[in-house]
Amino acid sequence: MNEIIQKIKDHKIVPLFYNESFEVSKNIIKALYEAGIRVIEYTNRGHQALENFTELKAISHTEFPGLLLGIGTVKNIEEMDDFANAKANFIITPVISEALVKYSFERNLLLIPGCFTPSDINIAYQNDLKLVKIFPADGLGKNYIKSVKPVFPGMNFMPTGGIHADYKDITEWLNGGAIAVGLGSSLIGKDFNEEELTLKTKDLLQQLNHN
């Protein structure tokens, strides 16, 4: 589990998306993978999410070796169980609860829970989780993590929601105490173009890793 957190920290960005089409989903992952991304969150936001995710995991070992593919927008134990059975590398939730945390331990899953308040973060901290998603990040601002981080030594933070896919915005979040950011529609727009996504993501990774 610590290896996944380290890989997230190394990448500094975690792309997240959902598409009803398996082929489009596969092409988006291919474009991100070719740019150098090795950690992706597929979101549970549609009827095809479980089926698509299961198929994507089935092909990832051969088509995308080394890719860590997790599932996001998981809200209850039933969904967590479904995606655990589909071999998700990690589970990201928009909320946190003792029940979700307990079940993640039972299934030996890396849970990255969504937290908004210090009380939310404290549930993760008291249960020895090492990474939380700050969500929705744009509702809290770039100084929030810097303010709460000293209270929770050893905790890592990944803001998601409303973050722009540009070097300046991401760097401000990183300088504010985040280890990485989640990037959704600002990186992967509705008018998806595989070549443009690869170039945009590769350029972003190069800027983040060479400055």
Image (tube, rainbow, N blue to C red):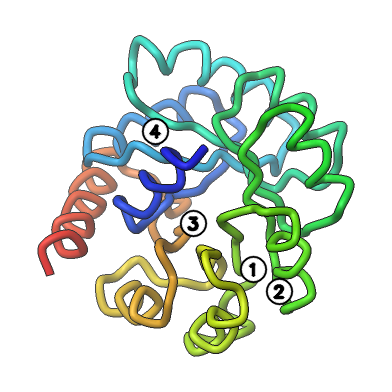
According to the picture, the residue beneath numbered tag 4 turns out to be 29
Q: Nearer the viewer, mark 1 or mark 3?
A: 1
In-front residue for pair 107/204? 107
**Mark nearer the N terminus (1 vs 4):** 4
Q: Is residue 117 left or right of residue 15?
A: right
Secondary structure of the residue carrying numbered label 4? helix
Judge the density around disc 3: few (<14), some (14-19), many (≥20) Cα neighbours within 10 Å: many
Q: Which mark is residue 116?
A: 2
Q: Is residue 176 left or right of residue 22?
A: left
Between the residue at mark 4 and the residue at mark 2, the CA separation in whole angstroms equals 29 Å
* Residue located at (78% from left, 46% from top): 101
* Residue located at (35% from left, 66% from top): 165
According to the picture, the residue beneath numbered tag 3 turns out to be 184
Between the residue at mark 2 and the residue at mark 1, the CA separation in whole angstroms equals 6 Å
| Amino acid bearing label 4 | Ile
**Mark nearer the N terminus (1 vs 3):** 1
Q: In the rendered image, which quarter is residue 108 located in?
A: top right
Q: Is residue 61 above or below residue 143?
A: above
Which residue is outermost to the left?
210
Judge the density around disc 4: few (<14), some (14-19), many (≥20) Cα neighbours within 10 Å: many
Percent position (x, y) of residue 107? 74, 27
Between the residue at mark 3 and the residue at mark 4, the CA separation in whole angstroms equals 13 Å
* Residue located at (61% from left, 20% from top): 87
Residue contact between numbered discs 2 and 1, judged by CB atoms under 8 Å: yes
Judge the density around disc 1: few (<14), some (14-19), many (≥20) Cα neighbours within 10 Å: many
**Mark nearer the N terminus (4 vs 2):** 4
Percent position (x, y) of residue 71? 61, 38
**Mark nearer the N terminus (3 vs 4):** 4
Percent position (x, y) of residue 78? 87, 32
Between the residue at mark 1 and the residue at mark 4, the CA separation in whole angstroms equals 23 Å
Q: Nearer the viewer, mark 1 or mark 4?
A: 1
